[in-house]
Image (spheres, grey):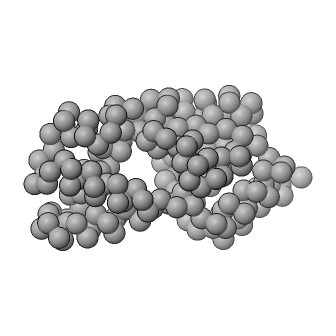
Amino acid sequence: MTWDNNEIYKKYEIKYSLKTDSLSNLMDEYLHGANLGEYEDFFDFYKKTKPSINLTVEKLNDIFQEAQSTVRVRPEMISYIKILSKKYKIAILSNFTSGLEDLLKDVFVIRHLFDVVVSSYNLKISKPDPRIYQHTLKKLEVRSNEAIFIDDVGKNVEVAEKLGIRGIIFQDFNQLQKDLDKILKLEK
């Protein structure tokens, strides 16, 4: 999944004459806690942290909801996952707020492609904490040397590799497919 949140945040930083990156930094702070289940929603975050930004909680929540509405899946990835899922176990391990399973099932209609869905929100542990990778391996019923972890954040991949999981840093679909195919061909 990917989203175009930074464009939304920039738009409102200009509109409300806010400091550059102030909205993205605030939303990153919210998401970090929300991913761990520290906040029920943005209103709870605002109440607990009292951020020093000159916008109402309602306006900030509207901005965040608009940014979240840009979440989308990559069609080429879905097609590739469909092919891979015929032969391999597939998991999604995400630092996502509540509702990941519902989003996959009801909005994107792709939940059926994954043997396991692990959300940091449900576990109260987020990547790159080694425990979330170990939990995922256990749910998949595979050893670390039998797994491949793909993420667009290098630190997340580094931690997986320290656990014995092969890792790929996602840059774009073509690079991912090439790198993954190389690893999978070696296994044959």
Determine if residue 61 is in view: yes
Vertical arrangement, residue 36 with respect to residue 82, above or below? above
In-front residue for pair 109/115: 109
Vertical arrangement, residue 178 with respect to residue 143, above or below? below
- In percent of the image, x 11 and y 47: which residue is there? 52
- In percent of the image, x 20 and y 55: which residue is there? 59
Which residue reaches farthest front? 106
Residue 165 picture quarter? top right
Residue 118 image position (x, y, % from top left):
58, 37
**In this rendering, would 14 be left or right of 166?**
left
Residue 137 image position (x, y, % from top left):
67, 33
Vertical arrangement, residue 61 with respect to residue 124, above or below? below
Residue 146 image position (x, y, % from top left):
76, 40
**In this rendering, would 11 be left or right of 136?**
left
- In percent of the image, x 60 and y 64: which residue is there? 74
Which residue reaches farthest right? 188
Residue 20 picture quarter? bottom left
In-front residue for pair 21/167: 21
